Amino acid sequence: EDEARTALAHMESAQEGLVRAEKMAALGRLVAGVAHELNTPIGNIMMVASTQQEVVQKLNASLASGALTRNALNSLAGQIDEGSGLMLSSARRAAELIQNFKQVAVDQTTDQLRDFELDRQIAEMLSVIAHVLSKTPIKLVQKLESGIPMHSYPGPLGQVLTNLVMNAAKHGFNDTQPGTITVACVRQGDRACITVTDNGAGIPPENVGKIFDPFFTTTLGQGGTGLGLHISHNMVYGPLGGHMTVLSTPATGTVFTLLLPLTAPGSSRL
């Protein structure tokens, strides 16, 4: 009996370690995504700032030589105004990305129970991991019903959806194959139904029953650990208090369906 208790304690400790490792891996992917997404607006700001310096130098030179005409002044003013507008929009885009990342990062490193709008939460999460698809011919489509209030755990939810989208991108398509991944959510009474659908290669029938098993992977030695879907399954049936199903047809695509209560089990909210 003592040996059984010790073995159980070791298993629980190992499982906690795997969950923490998966959280850190997911956060690492988010960091890489934000860095990639910030390159564009920051690059735009640097390019425009350099151009603005040249415009100011031209203005000063024209003033010093007394050759500044009304048309030249209007032209330089137009360039300054256009550049300022581009810098402002790029700065806003960068600030939006950072804000989204801060919220998603906090959610994914904690198990905080809080109120949130489901569509906004999913949209924020997808904006952070969009870099995965920006380098591929895969199109990401969002069909999110607005006004679905949740009192649940956005961290585990974000990890589950991140795993499902990235799993579809990695296993459903090859490097050059175009395709679509659609994330949708609708309200069904006191539950939310979330689907992640792809029109990729599908899952072989003999593997459908194994995909939630720990360490099952078809890419062993290629970066796959076989833990992503297993941990996602545990999060759905654990803190999120929901159900997860998968339907897949080879050469047609795969649909993961999550049915989650609007109020997480164990919550004190009535």
Image (cartoon, helix red, strand yellow):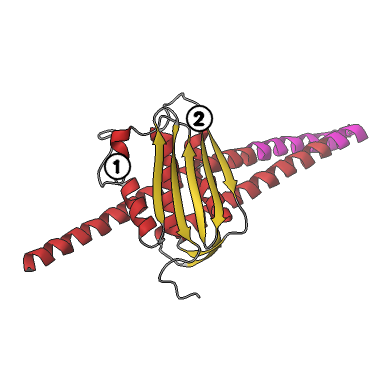
Give me the residue at 53% from left, 51% from top: 122
Q: How many numbered circles does the render carry?
A: 2
Image-quadrant location for residue 108: bottom left
Say above or below: 71 vs 110: above
User: Considering the numbered disc 1 on the image, is that residue within a helix, a strand or a loop?
Assistant: loop
Residue farthest top in this picture: 176
Mark 1 or mark 2: which is in front?
1
Position of residue 161 measured from the top left corner of the image (x, y, whole percent): 45, 48
- Badge 2: residue crowd in 10 Å (few <14, some 14–19, many ≥20): some
Direction from residue 51 to residue 169 in the image, left or right: left
Q: Give the Cα distance between marks 1 and 2.
A: 25 Å
Specify the segment rendered in magenta. Answer: 47-75
Say above or below: 180 vs 159: above
Direction from residue 18 to residue 28 in the image, left or right: right
Give me the residue at 45% from left, 41% from top: 255
Tell me which amino acid carries mark 2.
Gly
Position of residue 178 measured from the top left corner of the image (x, y, whole percent): 50, 26
- Nearest the viewer among 226 and 246 is 246
**Can see residue 258?**
yes
- Badge 1: residue crowd in 10 Å (few <14, some 14–19, many ≥20): few
Q: Is residue 87 magenta?
A: no
Residue at image mark 2? 179
Q: Earlier in the sequence, mark 1 or mark 2?
A: 2
Give me the residue at 79% from left, 42% from top: 81
**Can see residue 99?**
no
Give me the residue at 44% from left, 58% from top: 155
Residue at image mark 1? 209
